[in-house]
Amino acid sequence: MTPATRRERFELLYDGLYAPISGYVLRRSRDPEDAAEAIAETFATLWRRLDSCPGGDEARPWLFGVARRVLANQRRGERRRGALAERLTAELDPSRFAVSVAPASDGRVARAFAALSEPDREILTLLAWEGLTREELSVALGVSRPVARLRLHRARRRFEAALDAPAQLRLSEGRTP
């Protein structure tokens, strides 16, 4: 089948079966976003398996079968995610993950950290709290090592400046830190 013929066949099937397949999926989905995902996956499968799709009147029930399996896979995935969430909730002690930002009783470190931008907080937490190496940090951020080093350097500088800001303010007002 030529690419043009393939495209024409897909478009004919899509135009003729979009409404019935969408209705089928929408009636069986709890969430419109899940339905949209299932409809998209159904037609993506049609495109991938267009050569396997029967011709004529047999294409309609074949595509309903595809949609049924897509919905079943979606439900299985939801059940697995739900079971995992329940298991993790039962097994994990949230106090293990509580973060003590600063030993200082005045909360200076916590305030300085909170004053940082989200990207700066993320890079510092990945390195310090999550224990990633600089090389792992570049992978997690999806950037080269030099870019990760530069971002880390800048984040540390901004954190230091945020830490010093209250002390500088107190000194300028004539108070001692």
Image (cartoon, helix red, strand yellow):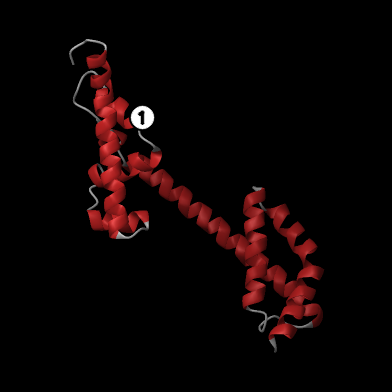
Measuring from the top left, give residue 21's x and y in whole percent. 74, 63
Q: Residue at x 63, y 50 (%)?
A: 33
Density class for disc 1 (Cα within 10 Å; few <14, some 14-19, many ≥20) is some
Q: Residue at x 50, y 52 (%)?
A: 79
Q: Residue at x 59, y 61 (%)?
A: 72
Measuring from the top left, give residue 113's x and y in whole percent. 31, 31
Q: Is residue 80 above or below residue 96?
A: below
Please tell me how many numbered marks the rendered image carries.
1
The image quarter in which residue 45 lies: bottom right
Q: Residue at x 71, y 71 (%)?
A: 63
Q: Which residue is mark 1?
A: 115
Q: Which quadrant is the N terminus positioned in?
A: bottom right
Q: Which quadrant is the C terminus positioned in?
A: top left
Measuring from the top left, give residue 126's x and y in whole percent. 29, 46
Can residue 176 be seen by looking at this rendering?
A: yes
Q: Disc 1 residue type?
A: Ala
